[in-house]
Amino acid sequence: MSDGAGPSAAAQVAFLGKIERLLGEGQFVATYKYALLIALADLAVQHGGDDGAPLDLPVRTIAERFIELYWRQCAPYGGAVADGEYGILLQNTGRQASIIGVVASLRRTYGTLSRAASSPEWRRAVSETARLIQTMPLWRLQVLRSETLDFLYEKSPKRGHIRLKDGVAANLRRFHGMIVRLAQAEWLHFIQSLPANAGVLGPISDLGQFLFGAERAALMKVAGPLAEAQSGLCLYCQRAVHAGEVDHFVPWSRYPRDLAHNLVLAHAKCNRDKSDLLAAEIHLERWMRRNEDHGQAIGEAGTRSNLIVDLPATIGVARWAYAHGQSLQARTWLHGDALEALSGRWSALLGT
Ligand SMILES: [Zn+2]
């Protein structure tokens, strides 16, 4: 991956300014635009590069990411009921957002996302969501009150695709954390501002965790299989772990998706010490080897626990995170308070 050919510093600043304008000046009647922006940023990390090239994305892939984003939001929130039918938070200034009907129905029938994704109904749900995305947010995200800012994407010559314009995938990758946090904060604010949700939101304060947090209970379900794959040892300190925690190897704060192979078993203290830092290259080497040797078992456990199972994508995310760390000269976590700089070995470990 080339370092010099990406967007210039001036182009990066202009890009962020436009993202801020989209979120600040755009008109929002539903939460779709936030979801769209997050989906595009996530997909740029998974499928794009840093060289500034345009990127074609299938609308169906965006639709699958949409369903995933709304999945946890379709659980009933707290005791009271915002929306008479499902007890789900309202996501639209008018009637409930249509995507909620699609996702809530899948959730009622199949319970978990992975079961839904392998069900006969999945294709139809994705088609319906793709159609919704085509008519609703896709051609409105870039429209402000008095101006069109179509800097992100355009129609692609490939059927059923959109094309991220020159430099967009690279910028979304570079500023992924910032853009996702900004979109989530606006999404949260939008939901809080709807009068119909007001009665429901009163007693429960962890709305952000509910909307966007990791489902800890689901994570703990893979603790057993992870322990088996790691011979009962903490991935980081290599000592025996009994009542450990399930940690996101590439931190959740950097890439908030539950990819099964990104999860590791670790001591609570190791997990806490590592916090939001990238793990040092010695841990990366161990993580890669564990996934090579036990990738299939971890994948099967992940599917049973409603996690996303996609090892190549997970490695792609790690490659992105370490390249990003390197470009920022980030220090990585070794043990306790000890940090170290990246040597560049990550690149060979991750096959770049
Ligand atoms: Zn440990």
Image (cartoon, rainbow, N blue to C red):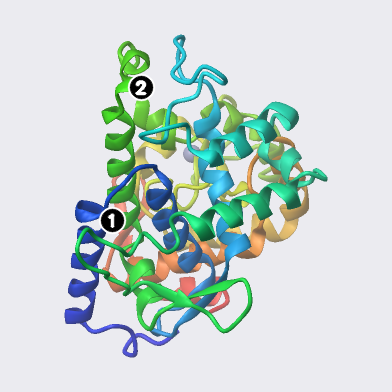
Labels 2 and 1 touching (C-beta < 8 A): no
Instruction: Give the Cα distance between marks 2 and 1.
Output: 27 Å
Q: Is residue 29 visible?
A: yes
Give the class, few, some or many, for how many residues have Cα within 10 Å of label 1's Cα (few <14, many ≥20).
Answer: few
Q: Residue furthest bottom?
A: 5
Residue in the image at 51% along x and 47% along y: 257
Residue nearest the viewer, comparing 104 with 203? 104
Which dot marks residue 247? none
Query: Callout 2 environment at 10 Å: few (<14), some (14 to 19), or many (20+)?
Result: many
Label 2 residue near ligand 1, CB within 8 Å: no
Q: How many marks?
A: 2
Vertical order, 204 against 230 (above or below): above
The percent position of residue 251, horizontal first and vertical second, equals 42, 49
Q: SS class of the residue under badge 1?
A: helix
Circle 1 residue: 178
- Quadrant location of the N terminus? bottom left
Residue 202 spot, x, y in % from top left: 30, 13
Mark 2 secondary-structure assignment: helix
- Mark 2 or 1, nearer chain start: 1
Q: Is residue 174 left or right of residue 10?
A: right
Q: Name which quarter of the figure residue 173 lies in.
A: bottom left
Q: Quarter of the image holding residue 58?
A: bottom right
Badge 2 is on which residue?
197
Residue at (34% x, 90% y) in the render: 5
Q: Nearer the viewer, residue 107 or 216?
A: 107
Residue type pointed to by label 2: Asn
Could you tell whether 145 is left or right of 286 in the image?
Answer: left
- Closer to the observer: label 2 or label 1? 2
- What amino acid does circle 1 point to? Met
Q: Relative to 302, is 197 above or below?
A: above
Q: Is mark 1 within 8 Å of ligand 1?
A: no
- Residue 183 appears at what percent x and percent y? 32, 49
